[in-house]
């Protein structure tokens, strides 16, 4: 393929054209009376989207210059969502006019560095005015009003979300998801919910509900690959001797261990099962640390020898495993020193993290530490 040479004027014009085209799609979504756009994925049915943040990354220009311009808007949306959480449409409008007017000023002969200095001074003045006009957020009425703005003036949904925040408290997690039902519903999930289910249907204890239920299980979080060893066998025998079930949450589980646990479970030799820890890398380790803090366990990893034993196990009131999820109900651990210490550490990391994806990963550990969420 022959190389394509772009002049400065042509590239500048094409970049601004990309900003303009994307902005004309996204800016009509601004405000409570904003319009929706119809987006049709290549492998799904068309759907209405009323958020600039949801649709911006899905739109890609085949023209390289226009795509560069579009990425200016996409990066601006990503930055404002990672810091403020909302305001994507207003960001699009501001960025569009900054690019358009900036190009006009540069074409008039003004130095780009002088223009940048002027833009920084204008930004500081605008921020000062906004802070001066800001009204402190206070009470349920303000919360409901703010949520209603984000929910398209749906006061019923706003009141339901406000109620959810009351239930989970200031450090709790509230998630809004799509529902196949016509009406909005409030679902409270007590305890820890992990996005990993049982390893085999052989662990099912309730054929009707298709779940594995464990009463007063010992909990062993392990950031190691779990293999069949004498120490693991001794742990299973000790749990059986105490009349306790056992749930192991490991980074990785050897196939031999999966088979032997399933056979022993079916034969009634032991009430021990295992799941693989959700997440990857540092995110997985944080979740395992959070489980250890909440259940009173000691995280098993290479640093402390990686040898499973009854001393490393924590406790829970109950555990329920289905095909996709594991729910662990813990009592009396939410206010212990280990949980408070880790919660402060994770919250500090969230406050200093500017990347939205990384903050979402930190939320996974926070959900475990808060022992519940509302959807």
Image (spheres, grey):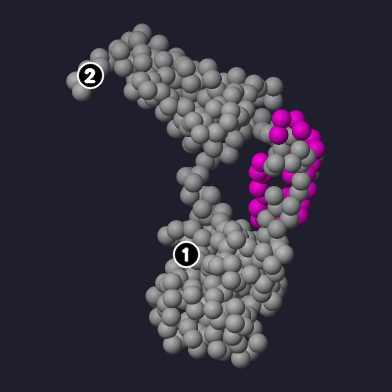
Residue in view at x 25 percent, y 17 percent: 6
What crowding class fits label 1: few (fewer than 14 Cα within 10 Å), some (14-19), or many (20 or more)? many
Q: Position of residue 248 (x, y in %)?
A: 54, 74
- The residue tagged 1 is 285
What crowding class fits label 2: few (fewer than 14 Cα within 10 Å), some (14-19), or many (20 or more)? few
* Residues in magenta, as a range: 151-178
Q: Position of residue 267 (x, y in %)?
A: 59, 82
Q: Position of residue 200 (x, y in %)?
A: 55, 67
Which mark, residue 4? 2
Q: Which picture quadrant has residue 318?
A: bottom right
Q: CA distance from mark 2 to mark 1?
A: 48 Å
Question: Does 235 appear in magenta?
Answer: no
Q: Earlier in the sequence, mark 2 or mark 1?
A: 2
Q: Which picture quadrant has residue 343?
A: bottom right
Q: Which picture quadrant has residue 182?
A: top right
- Kindly check if marks 2 and 1 are in contact, taking CB atoms under 8 A apart as contact: no
Q: Please name whichever residue, 213 or 329, is drawn nearer the observer in this view of the structure.
A: 213
């Amino acid at each position: 393929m022959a190389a394509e040479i772009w002049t400065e004027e042509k590239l500048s014009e094409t970049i601004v054209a990309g900003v303009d085209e994307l902005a004309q799609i996204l800016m009509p979504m601004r405000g409570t009376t904003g319009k929706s756009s119809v987006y049709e994925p290549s492998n799904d049915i068309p759907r209405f989207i009323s958020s600039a943040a949801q649709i911006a990354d899905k739109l890609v220009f085949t023209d390289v210059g226009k795509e560069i311009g579009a990425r200016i808007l996409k990066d601006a949306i990503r930055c404002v969502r990672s810091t403020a959480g909302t305001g994507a449409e207003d960001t699009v409008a501001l960025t569009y006019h900054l690019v358009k007017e900036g190009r006009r000023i540069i074409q008039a002969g003004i130095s780009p560095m002088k223009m940048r200095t002027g833009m920084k001074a204008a930004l500081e003045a605008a921020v000062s005015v906004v802070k001066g006009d800001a009204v402190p957020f206070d009470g349920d009425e303000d919360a409901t009003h703010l949520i209603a703005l984000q929910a398209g003036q749906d006061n019923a949904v706003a009141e339901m979300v406000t109620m959810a925040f009351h239930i989970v408290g200031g450090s709790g997690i509230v998630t809004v998801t799509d529902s196949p039902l016509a009406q909005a519903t409030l679902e409270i999930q007590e305890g820890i919910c992990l996005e990993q289910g049982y390893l085999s249907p052989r662990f099912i204890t309730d054929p009707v509900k298709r779940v594995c239920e464990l009463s007063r299980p010992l909990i062993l979080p392990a950031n190691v690959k779990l293999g069949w060893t004498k120490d693991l066998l001794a742990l299973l025998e000790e749990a059986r001797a105490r009349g306790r079930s056992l749930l192991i949450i490991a980074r990785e589980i050897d196939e031999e261990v999966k088979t032997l646990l399933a056979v022993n479970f079916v034969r009634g030799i032991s009430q021990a099962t295992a799941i693989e820890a959700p997440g990857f890398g540092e995110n997985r380790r944080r979740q395992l640390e959070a489980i250890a803090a909440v259940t009173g366990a000691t995280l098993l990893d290479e640093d402390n020898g990686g040898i499973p034993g009854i001393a490393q196990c924590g406790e829970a009131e109950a555990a329920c495993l289905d095909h996709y999820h594991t729910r662990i109900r813990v009592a009396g651990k939410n206010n212990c020193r280990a949980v408070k210490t880790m919660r402060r550490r994770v919250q500090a990391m969230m406050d200093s993290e500017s990347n939205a994806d990384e903050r979402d990963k930190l939320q996974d550990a926070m959900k475990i530490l808060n022992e519940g969420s509302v959807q």
